[in-house]
Image (spheres, coloured by chain):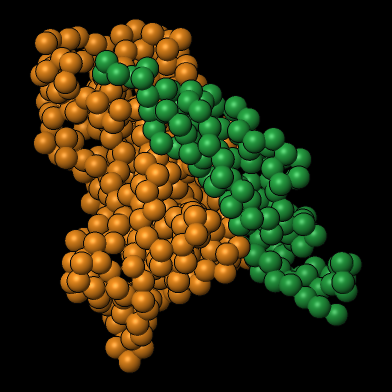
Chain colours: A green, B orange
Amino acid sequence: MEGKEIICISCPKGCRITVRNRGEEIISIAGNDCPKGIKYAEEEFINPLRILPTTVKVIGGELPLVSVKTKNAIPKRLLLKAMTEIAEIEVKAPVKIGQVIKDDLMGTGVSLVATRNIKRADSNLCS
Amino acid sequence: MKLEYDLVIIGGGPAGLAVALEAKRNAVKDILLLERDKYLGGILPQCIHNGFGLQYFKEELTGPEYAERFIYKLNDNQIDVKTETMVIEITPDKQIIAINRDDGLLYIQAKAVVLAMGCRERTREALAIPGSRPAGIFTAGTAQRYINIEGYMPGREVVVLGSGDIGMIMARRMTLEGAKVKAVLEIMPFSTGLIRNKVQCLDDFNIPLKFNHTITRIEGGKRVEGVTVAQVDKNLQVISETEEEISCDTILLSVGLIPENELTREAGIKLDQVTRGPIVNENRETELEGIFACGNVLHVHDLADFVTEEGEIVGRAVGEYLKRNRKFRSQSIKIVPGDNIAYVVPQHIDFLIPGRKKIKIFMRVKKPAERVRINLLDVKGRVLGSYKKRIVTPGEMVSVYLPEALLDDKFKNITVSVEKETRE
């Protein structure tokens, strides 16, 4: 039997939960102080997911970057690979908040969206 | 140039934005929002990570998205905004002196003023770390601005001092951008940040968090070349035998935030020694009537959502103040921090408000504790109210509701204490 330790983030207590498993099958979950811990540990054990917030280069914008995020969480193991792919992307100003910057990031089915507005650099010339 | 407004808000971050919109909803007419940066939102646009809005909007947003939810509403609400405008003085009779490139010197007379200037990061100078003074030492927030807004990478091999939230978030951010974060050092035996950030920013990327550790020396001529780190004992004194060297080209400091109260102090408003923000009543009104404070200038919050909540308290309070229909209690009731409580906000209760059922009291504990009760005690030590908390930590603000029914005009003060739970 194998095991994995998971720190629950459902509350400030941060219970150390031990998941015992045989391959992909969970045998037991222990160390959680409340039921929230079981759900969290299951999800973290089976397929930990994270939203990836980062930035993308903007051409002709009032700022050189626009902040972006994956619209939904993607598998944790793909985070660093996703960063290399996102580094290649450039987007032309203006950018609108919510605008899709890249569809179906790395075949995850999740899109990368802008999280702020970026105006064109020239729209600001008189200031 | 001379101007007159019902309400002038100083600072266009989450606190100021919430005040402006909530004051408008409470029939305050002429509102001016002053912001020294080029854009509204305060620190939020550079906080590109998710985790905002879970409390207030019940959905998870990034910092820029959270800010935008408020900013776009300002235009619909005819609230005047001046950006790139620096306030240089506030007088006790509510005149504000400010400067910007378009208007030059501005004299603004306000009926009510809200201080929403936020906070600053503690710097290396505040810590007095020995060693040379090379390039490569940044506060975590400065590095955050370089990477997320301006597009510069501050360094390649990083040591983070302090396990505050921004430090942990920047440890992840720099890792994602290709840097190697060698360690996060925390002088205390516990993290001062949120558990969520410890797990998702450090553990996810196998970044070691060393408790009871600090930097004892910075090495390097033109650029940081390394740091000497050591363990500290219970009294936070360095144990010199434990010293070791870590090579790095960058040091990020995440060692606390200081409310930015220069304007407040010069206006003659009394500050709380612990929060380093003004002393306020339940309306977040300072000792100068009609001058309010909220957000990180009042006390440092761990979530922007709580800042918004506080801004809205002030927005409503300004409405009441300008209508002049407030009733004071016969005597003010002081809320006093007791055992294991670092501070409470508000510091006193001044008003009789018909229909009010409870008053939310915010506090920070000094030390982590499990299975405790937050007790409200009268002068004689009698328990007025008692609230179970499974866990309290300095990194997470605690709140309890003080029931109006408990307030007696005879009370001079109420003490808030953390007590170990006696029964399971």
Residue A21: x, y in percent?
Answer: 84, 72
Task: Answer with left or right where residue A76 lies relative to residue B84.
Answer: right
Q: Residue at x 47, y 18 (%)?
A: B72
Task: Answer with left or right where residue B263 lies relative to residue A13.
Answer: left
Q: Quadrant of residue B314?
A: top left
Residue B23: x, y in percent?
Answer: 39, 17
Q: Say if B395 sits above or below A87 in the image.
A: below
The N terminus of chain B - image quarter: top left
Q: Quadrant of residue B201?
A: bottom right
Q: Say if A56 sits above or below A98 in the image.
A: below
Q: Nearer the viewer, residue B409 or B34?
A: B34
Q: Say if B79 sits above or below B357 in the image.
A: above
Q: Residue at x 39, y 33 (%)?
A: A63
Q: How many numbered discs, if any?
A: 0
Q: Residue at x 72, y 53 (%)?
A: A75
Residue B304: x, y in percent?
Answer: 46, 39
Task: Answer with left or right where residue B337 lies relative to residue B391.
Answer: left
Q: Quadrant of residue B71?
A: top left
Residue B317 seen anywhere in this rendered image of the structure? yes
Q: Residue at x 36, y 20 (%)?
A: A122
Residue B398: x, y in percent?
Answer: 48, 49
The C terminus of chain B - image quarter: bottom right
Q: Nearer the viewer, residue B292 or A75?
A: A75
